[in-house]
Image (cartoon, rainbow, N blue to C red):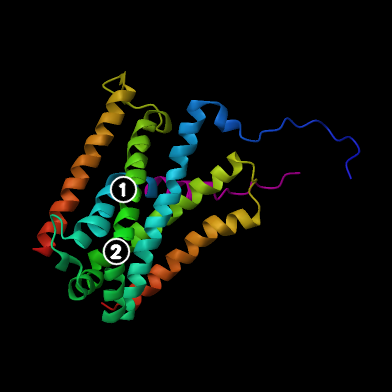
Amino acid sequence: MNKRRPYVRPMEGWWRKNPYFIEYMVHEGTALFVAAYALVLLIGVVRLAQGEAAWKAWLTALQSPLSVFAHLILLLAIGYHSYTWFKIMPRTLPPLSLGGKRVPGGAITATGLIAVALASLALLALAWRIST
Amino acid sequence: MNRPLKRSNAPIFWGLFGAGGMLAALLGPMLIFITGIAVPLGLLLPRSAMNYAAMLAFARHPLGKGFIFIVIALFLWHAAHRLFHSLHDIGIHGGTLAKLLTYGLAAAGTVIAAGALLATGF
C-alpha cells in the first residue's frame, strides 16, 4: 500500500478533446485494418497450402457481397494510411537537404504520393500481365 | 555500477514498423483492390486471375513466394508495433499481455505464413 496516494491527473479520453489528436488516433487506428488485411491474406495462403477445394472455398468467400464491402472499408482505411504516412513523413524523416537547401515538407509528401500512384499502377500492370 | 549498457531491441521493431508501413502505403491500397474487389467481381482483371493453378504457380515461384511472405509478415509487424504504442496512448501501459497480443500475434502469423508457404512446395 502506498500511504502517500499522490494526485494523478486523469488522462481518460485526452485525445477526444482536440481535433489534432483525434486525427492522430484515426491514423494510428489504420493499423487495425492493415492487420485485418494481413489476416485475410494469411488465411488465403493457408487455404492454398491445403489444396484446391480449400482454395476454391476461400475464393467463393471473397466473392460474397459482405467480403467485397469489407474490402472497400479496408481500401478506404489503408488509403488513408498511405496518405497520412507521407503527410507526416516530413516530421518522421531526419531533415533532408538537397544542394545545401532543406527540402520542404510539401515536396517530401508530394514525392511520396506520386510514388504511391506509380507503385499502384505498376502492381496493377503486373497483375494484368500475369493474368491475361 | 559499471555494468555495460544493454543493447536495446527497439531499433529492430521500429525498423519492421517502418518497412511494413512503407510497403502498406505504397502497395496496400492496390493489393486490396486487386485481391478483394477487382478479381472477385471480375472488374478490370479476370476472375480466373486467382484460380488454383495460377495462385499455386505464383506461390511456388521464388519471387511470388517471397512477395507473399514479405507482405504478410511486414504488414503484421507494422500493425503490431503501432497498436502496441497506441495501447499506451489509451492508458494500457505495455505489459506482457499487451506485448503478446501485438508482437506475439505478429510472430505467430509470420511463422504460420512461412509454414504454409513451405507446404505449397517449390
Check if mark 1 and mark 2 are on a common chain. yes
Q: Please tell me the numbered disc located at residue A75.
A: 1
Which residue occupies 59% across, 39% down?
B89
State yes or no: residue B35 in magenta.
Answer: no
Question: Magenta segment, which residues?
Answer: B1-19
**Rendered location of residue B78, percent (x, y):** 43, 50
Q: Nearer the viewer, residue B11 or A29?
A: A29
- Does B9 appear in magenta? yes
Q: Tell which of B111 and A66 is nearer to you.
A: A66
Looking at the image, the residue that sits furthest to the right is A3
Identify residue type, mark 1.
Leu
Give the amino acid at mark 2: Ser
- Where residue A36 appears, x then y in whole percent? 41, 56
| Residue at disc 2, secondary structure | loop
Which residue sits at x=40%, y=51%?
A34
User: Which residue is the site of mark 2?
Assistant: A64
Left or right: residue A23 versus residue B60 is right
Horizontal relation, residue A73 to residue B81: left or right: left
Quarter of the picture containing the N terminus of chain A is top right
Q: Label 2 crowding class (10 Å Cα cut-off): few <14, some 14-19, many 20+?
A: few
| Residue B88 percent across, percent down from the top left | 60, 42
The residue under the point 13% across, 63% down is B46
